Image (tube, helix red, strand yellow):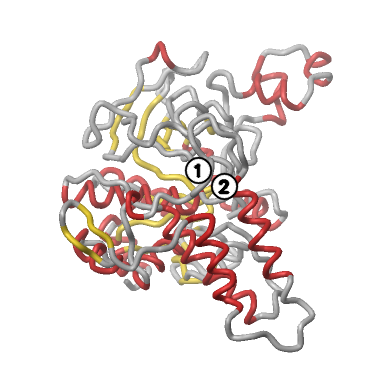
Amino acid sequence: MKKILTIAAMAAMSASLFAQTDTVKVQSDKDTVEGFRFTTIDSVGITPVKDQNRSSTCWAFSTIGFLESEVLRTKGKELDLSEMFVVSKTMIDRAVYCVRLYNEPHFAPGGSAYDVIYCMEHYGLVPQEAMPGIRYGWTKNDTLPVHSELDHVASGYLKGLNGLKRISPVWKEGLQAVYDTYLGKCPEEFTYEGKTYTPKSFVKELGLKADDYVSFTSYTHHPFYEKFALEVPDNWRMDQMYNLPIDELMQVIDNALAKGYTLAWGADVSEIGFTRKGIGVVPDDDHGADITGSDMAKWVGMTADKKKEELTKKPLPEKEITQQMRQDAYDNWETTDDHGMQIFGIAKDQNGKKYYMIKNSWGTMRSDYKGIWYVSEAFMRYKTNDVLVHKNAVPKEIKKKIQW
């Protein structure tokens, strides 16, 4: 996914977002955005919100958060896993892929939820303390764009291979040294809570299995109930996803939450209705003056930012999302692979409208809900690219249709 780069300061990693993680608490109505009042209907345990800072690594943060919730669900244990271990392993793999294709694909720091699952299966995982990540800068209130520097250096290294008739067998070692310099070396062995592990033995200790997780999407340019590799730039590993009608994809999401599972969520957040304050809606902007009660002449003269503010400051009528609307937005590049987050609960606003509770990775200072976003059902139907979920969370009737 092309990641939205956040400029928020990093919240202290050790600070807990909620009073407890097994029963998620949401802030009271008095803390909400003006015009919105939410009541939690159901929620699943999550670990504290983190901050990806100025990095294009939401795919790692969202899926690591998802796996942390899986451990919380199965073992009742809250732990902090290292995102940068996954980033280092994934970017070297992506570089090898690009070089094998003569650097024709674009080498970029984005990725997908499947990249984390692949890393877990082939390389393992490590706790945050075993590989903290950025070795210089990236502390609270730090604005130094260290990750942007890393991305420029790494991409420049690969570009330096272009035009050569032959490359040496050690080029990858040079690139690995770049990632080791900025992120630290990936540990081959470490001690955690008094026991020594390798990254793979740590995964086994956590009880996580790559085969337990499956991806779903919903587009009409491939047959429903079959698998295909979603054609977005950061699905470079060509993860095969089950294709469902949008109504059934929503059933997967709702069933997972009802059964106590979270989901890793790939979405487009470039829409007018996705705010940096914690709201995601699909306002009927074609009738903006009418639904906001604005004078038409005044509305026409408003800036785009002012219109967005008016359309997202309180609950308003939304567009009715169809399968064809999803497909059209995908085909015309309106829907892109922007951002990865974690779905963990359901809430309702003061009018009884349903929203999904989303854990973001932009720290606790960006949104009015301390790092949590409230996304309407319409937004979820319209702007979901894909979801990753435990296979046991999939409804039985859908498993039959996809010939599980």
Q: Quadrant of residue 220?
A: bottom right
Which numbered marker is on residue 275?
none
Residue at 62% from the left image edge and 52% from the top image edge? 2
**What crowding class fits label 2: few (fewer than 14 Cα within 10 Å), some (14-19), or many (20 or more)?**
many
Compared to 317, does 225 lie above or below? below
In what element is the residue under mark 1?
loop
Q: Which residue in the protein does label 1 denote?
A: 52
Residue at 59% from the left image edge and 46% from the top image edge? 146
**39 or 3: nearer the viewer:** 3
Instruction: Residue type at mark 2: give it.
Output: Ser
Tell whether 271 sits left or right of 40: right
Q: Quadrant of the N terminus?
A: bottom right
Q: Quadrant of residue 30?
A: top left
Separation (CA) of disc 1 from disc 2:
6 Å
**28 or 98: nearer the viewer:** 98
Tell whether 371 sits left or right of 146: left
Residue at 42% from the left image edge and 15% from the top image edge? 31
In what element is the residue under mark 2?
loop
Q: Which residue in the protein does label 2 denote?
A: 55
Q: Quadrant of residue 110?
A: bottom right
Answer yes or no: is residue 121 visible: yes
- State if disc 2 and disc 1 touch (CB < 8 Å): yes
